[in-house]
Image (spheres, helix red, strand yellow):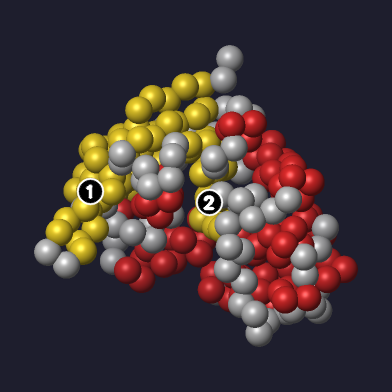
Amino acid sequence: MPLISLRDVYFNYETGTKRLEALKDISLDIDPGEFLAICGPSGCGKSTLLNILGTLERPSAGSYLYDAHNLADCNASQLARLRAREIGFVFQSFNLIESLSVYENIELALLYKHDGRHNLRHRVMEAMDRVGIAHRADHLPRQLSGGQQQRCAIARAIVGRPAIILADEPTGNLDSENAAQIFGILKALHQEGSTLVVVTHSASQADQAERVVEMLDGRIQFSRRRL
């Protein structure tokens, strides 16, 4: 059974008196433990689709089933709890809170999840060790390199042990060496059982996914599996 199932999904932006169709007739299944890459030119709807998958946006039309549950039946608070419990986000721009240390940025994800405080430190340390950032625990984001900031962002995404990791151009702001290291961490997480969905412009990264979805003008043009 798919972990995620989208059927006939549309998403519209309202801009003044105009309506922009960002997604058109999207149907997509994502299986538990799958590694999926979403590709296509800028403006084709990749990030909008990722926002729908992450419940940051609701479809304008169509259905979204998560683990066989219809998310149309969920209110905003229920969707927020689902995100905190099930979904880890990794963004191109890192989205770290500048006034918080590395440790505190990662810990915050568990506080949103309302986990008991008795195991917070163990979970945060475990996540930092996993991505090689523990030695920067007390540093602020501005004291880190780009690669270190993205490691912190990945630790924040995985500290709650989510079922699915959604990564939007996670190496787009990094040099080639750091990009390879960060992508290697994401691949290792998938190999350990995480469902991984990556939006990427990189053909070499897409070729490492189990399946590639190519988008154009808000539609899925094709979906292919690696041989």
Q: Which residue is mark 1?
A: 21
Q: Is residue 108 above or below residue 80?
A: below
Label 1: few (<14), some or many (≥20) within 10 Å? some
| The label number, if any, that marks residue 170 in the structure image | none
**Quarter of the image holding residue 80?**
bottom left
Q: Is residue 227 above or below residue 110?
A: above
| Along the viewing direction, whichever of 53 and 20 lies nearer the viewer | 20
Q: Is residue 188 left or right of residue 71?
A: right
Q: Is residue 5 left or right of residue 133?
A: left
Q: Position of residue 47 (x, y in %)?
A: 43, 50
User: How many labels sit on residues?
Assistant: 2
Mark 2 and mark 1: Cα distance apart in space = 20 Å
Q: Which residue is mark 2?
A: 168
Q: Position of residue 61 (x, y in %)?
A: 19, 48
Q: Residue furthest right?
A: 135
Q: Is residue 194 left or right of residue 60?
A: right
Answer with mark 2 or mark 1, whichever residue precedes in sequence: 1
Residue at 51% across, 55% down? 87
**Quarter of the image holding residue 29?**
top left
Q: Which quadrant is the C terminus positioned in?
A: top right
Is residue 198 among the parts visible in the rendering? yes
Q: What amino acid is at disc 2?
A: Asp
Is residue 118 among the parts visible in the rendering? no
